[in-house]
Amino acid sequence: MTRELWKGNEALAEAAVRAGVDAFFGYPITPQTELLEYMARRMPELGRTFLQAESEIGAINMVYGAACAGVRAMTSSSSPGISLMQEGLSYIAGSEVPCVLVDIMRGGPGLGNIQPGQGDYFQVTRSAGHGDFHPIVLAPSTVQEAVDLTYLSFDLAFRYRTIVIIAGDGALGQMMEPVEMPPMREPTVDRPDWALSGTAGRAPRIITSLYLDAEELERTNLRLQEKLHAIHTTEQNWESYQTEDAEWLVVAFGTVGRIAKSAVRAARGAGIRAGLFRPISLWPYPEAALDELIERVQGVLVVEMNAGQMLEDVRAIVQGRVPVRFLGRMGGVIPLPDEISAELAHMARMHQRGNGFGSQHRAAERSKIL
Amino acid sequence: MTKGTVSIQTDRCKGCGLCIQACPQHVLTLADTLNARGYHHVQLDERDGHCTGCGICAIVCPDVAFTVYREPLRRAA
């Protein structure tokens, strides 16, 4: 296979096409718009469905309907649009139908701006709507990884009848990189045995998220939890980089994950034994792998493009065994490798002096400086 | 040194700033205004005519926003 230069958003769209997406519904929003534009051109070419909805709320409910019919349905948006979709996502989760959602995160809260951000971590990993559920959330750090994860996402969504969210950010969506595209899959014609495909020759089926009887709803929830437990135990995914002998562990995901790689190399050049733990699945969080690494390091540095969201997951896993320090940039500012390696050097220095470096919140320190 | 200029399709620009880093003549800056896509796009600051038309901006630009013009060197007699 040859490698071609692709823009992140367009590469994600083509990967979904090759994975056999049957229907795309969406609404434009920067920095995700090229994905929708690409689909508007590509889907009709293949005789598949593309529809620009009147809003994100319309788009997610069209996805809900298409998913109930057992086809491969997807939508994409960016942070404020995902907020609008939450109601629909909860209904999809409650009805247990599969779909894929791409979130190209931007700076928030509110309209924020159109620069890259990671402030949707809570929004996408915790539930992305009301009620007890978690979507599967995958966070690529390169355009190639975005393509590979998107290609697999429909299989995951259908295996578990769940929502799969590809959580990228504005940098990844706008970035152009060489990519090896996966082969085109034949569209699936067989619909699953739960799909609403017309009652000709069979008994009617019902897909709903409404259970007025308390005990029935609890039974439904228990079944959902059982499924989430199965996902939690089997779908944890991560990358470890130079962690074998690491004393100082950087934990970062997505775009920051790849920036942190440069920082780890720089720190090692300066004699600091640094390593990187990069979660690829944000839910389920790769707890077991991180837990095992914590036993062998002196301290952890969490780096994110937000005020410290994944930080809470890391702290829950570390449970005070080693100090956890946080470096966060917000508003679309991307942390640079120098900042991260300087922070690692600071941690190593303080440790040598025997001062410890506490678990001070970097944002608080920054506001003091400002 | 040759004289040159660049024309920039500003609506393709996402303001990544790679060209600004790469320009050996320091004649590229980010505009205060936004383009149609909402980004501060790059612009050529030609006040002193320092652009040589070397084309490095066009090579590093991931979004193919530059067209480079270069005055041909005159041959000696």
Image (cartoon, coloured by chain):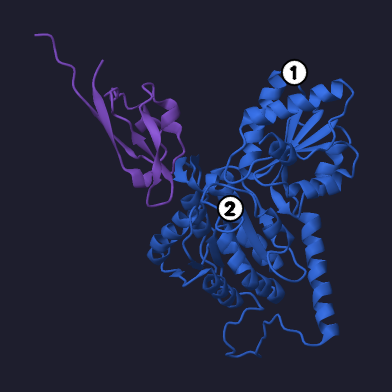
Chain colours: A blue, B purple
The residue located at (63%, 74%) in the rendering is A192
Q: Of residues A119 and A70, which is closer to you in this image?
A: A119
Q: Residues within 10 Å of mark 2 (few under 14, many from 20)?
A: many
Q: Which circle marks residue A105 in the picture?
A: 2
Q: Position of residue A110 (x, y in %)?
A: 59, 59
Viewer-proximal residue among A90 and A191: A90
Work out whether mark 2 precedes mark 1 in sequence or the reverse, and give the earlier one: 2
Taking the spot 46% from the left edge, 57% from the top edge, the residue there is A33
Q: Is residue A91 above or below residue A204?
A: above
Location of the C terminus of chain A (image quadrant) = top right
* Residue A22 visible to an observer of this rendering: yes
Disc 1 secondary structure class: loop
Cα separation, mark 2 vs mark 1, equals: 35 Å
Q: On the rendered structure, is A261 left or right of A223?
A: left
Asked whether B50 or A365 is in front, the reply is A365
| Residue with the mark numbered 1 | A271
